[in-house]
Amino acid sequence: MEIVLKYFDDFTPTQLQQLSALKELYTDWNSKINVISRKDMDNFYLHHVLHSLTIAAKFEFTPTMQIVDLGCGGGFPGIPLAIFFPDTPFHLVDSVNKKLTVVKEVANAIGLKNITTQHSRVEEIKNRKFDVVISRAVAPLKDLWYWSKPILNKRTANNKQPYGLICLKGGDLAQEIFESNCKPHIWEVTKVFNEDYFENKFLLNVL
């Protein structure tokens, strides 16, 4: 938890309680449904919570926006971001229902009211649009953008809010970006949070 407070110092008491409760909740649920690598649990706040909050360090989500977490797994980056932006609605989607069980139970346990879930592949989302698709290490950029485009709202010219696909990825992305035909904005996570763990990890935004 200290690693999160190293970079963010404006949490409300409710947000602090919610963030503090996450490790124990995920430790308990992980023993029943494996959603986080066991070796990662020792560095839970660095590897999962702070990594998810890279998005919050660069983008401001407002209450009028609709955010979808594509392939949310156990709830990252969606749950930390929903805590950070308590007035913004987040829709967490995954094709594995047991992972959504963890998401719902964790959200209920900490009183997180701005999360909804959907057991579905993203291609099956119909009749609903979003301002931003968020994702963490789910699929190649080419696929993420292919899945994102049909569910994104059209953006007006004077709209300064975050928009498009915002994803966290790692490794050498040159070939992946080339194959995607996208021209993402790219930030090195180590320039946001000066921690060795984030070496070769990146934040991408495709518009």
Image (cartoon, rainbow, N blue to C red):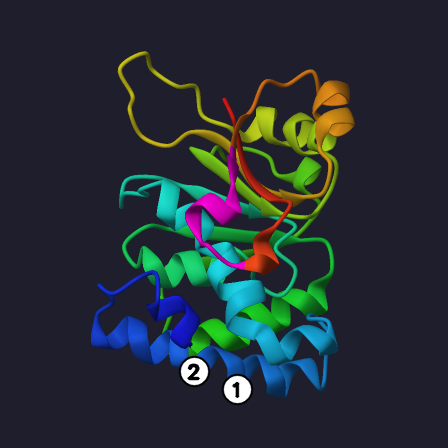
Q: Residues within 10 Å of mark 2 (few under 14, many from 20)?
A: some
Pick the front one: 4 or 98: 4
Residue in the image at 60% along x and 59% along y: 197
Q: Is residue 182 left or right of residue 96?
A: left
Give me the disc on residue 24: 1
Going 44% across and 76% down the picture, which residue do you hit?
108
* Quadrant in the rendering for residue 44: bottom right
**Amino acid type of disc 1?**
Glu
Q: Is residue 71 above or below residue 150?
A: below
Q: Residues within 10 Å of mark 1 (few under 14, many from 20)?
A: few
Which x, y percent locates residue 34? 74, 75
Q: Position of residue 22 (x, y in %)?
A: 48, 78
83 lies above or below 132? below
Pick the front one: 186 or 21: 186
Queried whether the magenta region covers residue 193, the answer comes back as yes
- Report the label total: 2
Rounded to the nearest whole Å, what is the CA distance between mark 2 and mark 1? 6 Å
Check the image and report above or below for 58 versus 108.
above
Span shown in magenta:
187-195
Amino acid, disc 2: Ala
Q: Which residue is most to the top? A: 157
Q: Is residue 77 found inside the magenta-colored segment of the image?
A: no
Q: Which element type, helix, strand or loop, lies under badge 2?
A: helix
Residue 54 appears left or right of 31: left
The residue nearer to you, when weighing 116 against 139, is 139
**Badge 2 is on which residue?**
21
SS category of the residue bearing label 1: helix
Q: Are marks 2 and 1 in contact (CB under 8 Å)?
A: yes
Horizontal and vertical percent position of residue 195:
51, 59
Rendering coords of residue 78 (x, y %):
50, 56
* Quarter of the rendering occupied by the N terminus: bottom left
Q: Residue 167 bears which disc, if any?
A: none
